[in-house]
Amino acid sequence: MLRLFLLLFVHFSVSLGGDCPNIRIRPSLSETCSGEGSFMNLVDSLIQDNFKIHNPCGRPHPRFIEVPDRSYDFIVVGAGSGGSVVASRLSENPKWKVLLVEAGEDEPVGSQIVGIGLNFQESSIDWNYQVFGSSDSEKILRYPRGKVLGGTSVLNGMMYMRGTKEDYEDWKDLGNTGWNHKNVLKYFKKSENNAEYENSYHGKGGMQHVERCPYTHPMVKDIFEAAVENGLEMNDLNAENQTGIMIAQFTQKNGVRRSSARSFLWPARDRPNLHIMVNSTVTKVLIKNKVAKGVKAITNKGNVFQIQAKKEVILSAGAIGSPHILLHSGVGPSKDLEDLGIEVHHNLPGVGENLQDHVLTRVNFMINQSDTNTLNWDTLKDYIINGNGPLSSRDLMVATAKIASPYSNGRADIQYYFYGSLVGCSKTGHPDELNTPGQKVLTMMPVMLRPKSKGYIKLKSSNPLDHPKIVGNYLQDPRDMEIILHGVKFAMTLGKPKALQKYNATLSREVPKGCEDFEFGSDDFMRCSIKAEYGSDNHQAGTCKMGPPNDPLAVVDPKLKVYGIDRLRVMDSSIMPNVIAGNTHATIQMIAEMGSDFVKEYWGY
Ligand SMILES: Cc1cc2nc3c(=O)[nH]c(=O)nc-3n(C[C@H](O)[C@H](O)[C@H](O)COP(=O)(O)OP(=O)(O)OC[C@H]3O[C@@H](n4cnc5c(N)ncnc54)[C@H](O)[C@@H]3O)c2cc1C
Ligand SMILES: *[C@@H]1O[C@H](CO)[C@@H](O)[C@H](O)[C@H]1NC(C)=O
Ligand SMILES: *[C@@H]1O[C@H](CO)[C@@H](O)[C@H](O)[C@H]1NC(C)=O
Ligand SMILES: *[C@@H]1O[C@H](CO)[C@@H](O)[C@H](O)[C@H]1NC(C)=O
Ligand SMILES: *[C@@H]1O[C@H](CO)[C@@H](O)[C@H](O)[C@H]1NC(C)=O
């Protein structure tokens, strides 16, 4: 009782609100954290009213509209990692009227807490796509995608990681003039406000705040030691040397998430020339004589609008959403569209093809460690008063490493995450509730960064509100399997050094179903385990790929304009010709920054 009193006291002394409406945006933490709600309800109301965490006076709701005007200069579809940047940059010109249409609603407050913000997967702000691992397997994966202002940057892991220099040189060599590393670096730096690094690789004063989490779990030091003993150097992996280990930076500040919406739309809240329609799904781009004329959208309440774009329509609906909208608009493989009775405006075979993603698997070590790194009164107090402690951080996930397998000519092609005792949801706030003292699991996750395997997206019906059929084709190319196998073996050696042996780390003896006949630890056993247990790292890309006119699968040209349809561009993860070798958010912001400049150049600003 005394603890509750203390916390409430602290709570009232920091929540000095203004006159701004404190809107409760669902889902709440008690809805997203399973279990009995009382403690989570309390957490929820403490942070709801904490202006350090979410400042309702900064939110973009003054720009929300229920009924759009008849026409705008630009219509941007989707307010995710990419679209928030595009709408923000284009509305910098007060003469351009910009409409941003987003299927979801404003960001909930709970997702702002760095330590538990990932719990919003599978909630009402997740599209919850399902994906077939391959066309001939039963395996079904979940693709979480944000359906919310800020898109997937509201429920992602926030790690700030760019692809390697060679990734962009590859894009250029494929015929995408202007996308060389030197040029894209300018745009990475334009977005970036890096609180820690000051050198030619990093930007200051940009709209996306980037810094390390305030709190570092003590075990991270041991993981570093083990990595260094295995030959990894400590490097900023977003700079000169692109292999090694680092404490990653995150798109957060003081333990509070900085989504693309918060970074790019909140500062635009006073611009009368920017309108935002939330709860509104675009069902098609209106096309006449091969020119994009506007969009058709339906609101949650069932109102349908046809809105005109005088200059351009820009799709930023993500790697699933953008090809999905194009197909319903009659832009895609004509045979598929005709089969569904969709009027074809342009035959573009690449729409929905070239789906690429990073595949990961788990290597589990049993360790002996009693750790109370969880969501309880003390960690909550530390977070609310100091913006520190486990709730401000991503646990062992703050460390990341990249290595080059023997298949990559020295280029980073495997990344590692580490996972141990992430702060979970809590029923009671009791410190021991989630942690049985003693044995725990330390997970190392190798991620395969340069997939040769490619999946696809196709429509299941002509109803634009139905989810499409998605097939990942993970590990279909045998080389992809050999790379991740290398990643698993290296993870096993990472567990050996003294630094981790002090926890008595031992490889888990679990045998996945179907792998019983293989000799434990043999290559074939590991291949079988990988097949049984792999997952997606949620870095889907490539489904509207950028390429030169002679590339039959190219959907957009190097200025991001859709082939065959005038006044229509795509700016999000779907335009990557090859998925970059790193986490995707920063690269998508770069794409949106560069694309916004193409538009400004074209229309003169
Ligand atoms: C669980 C998870 C963890 C991740 N961790 C990291 C990480 O640590 N670091 C990192 O860099 N990346 C991470 N990623 C990946 C990264 O977040 C995504 O690649 C990125 O956010 C995608 O950006 P986007 O602009 O392409 O699409 P999105 O951000 O998904 O934006 C698309 C937007 O369009 C809207 N939309 C879609 N269709 C329509 C329609 N028809 N009408 C209106 N609106 C529509 C959606 O609601 C959404 O808001 C993670 C992803 C997930 C799922
Ligand atoms: C990159 O690695 C090399 C070799 O280890 C080292 O000499 C150099 O200082 C590193 N560069 C940076 C910028 O860290
Ligand atoms: C969006 O829809 C949700 C759920 O239907 C509703 O609670 C919310 O008020 C709507 N927001 C706006 C701005 O219309
Ligand atoms: C590690 O913890 C487990 C479970 O508590 C225990 O059975 C085991 O004896 C411990 N191992 C060592 C070496 O202490
Ligand atoms: C690890 O194992 C040794 C030997 O069995 C034991 O003495 C030690 O207490 C164990 N350490 C932990 C952290 O359990």
Image (cartoon, helix red, strand yellow):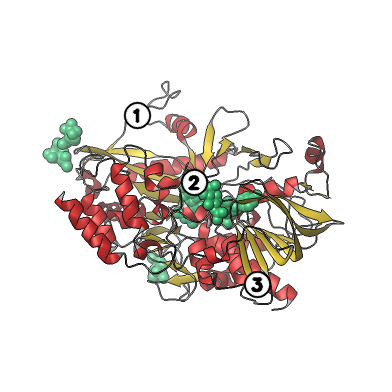
Residues 514 and 468: in front is 468
Tag 2 secondary structure = loop
Residue 125 screen position, x and y as percent: 51, 47
Residue at (72% x, 36% y) in the render = 461
Q: Amino acid at mark 3?
A: Asp
Residue identifier under label 3: 597
Q: Quadrant of ligand 2?
A: bottom left
Q: Quadrant of residue 89?
A: bottom right
Distance, label 1 to label 3, CA atoms, is 52 Å
Distance, label 3 to label 2, CA atoms, is 30 Å
Residue identifier under label 1: 510
Q: Nearer the viewer, mark 1 or mark 3?
A: 3
Tag 3 secondary structure = helix
Residues 455 and 23: in front is 23
Q: How many marks?
A: 3
Q: Amino acid at mark 2?
A: Asp
| Pointer 1 or 3: first along the chain | 1
Tag 1 secondary structure = loop
Which label sits on residue 195? none
- 210 shown above or below 153: below
Q: Residues within 10 Å of mark 2 (few under 14, many from 20)?
A: some
Residues 334 and 521: in front is 334
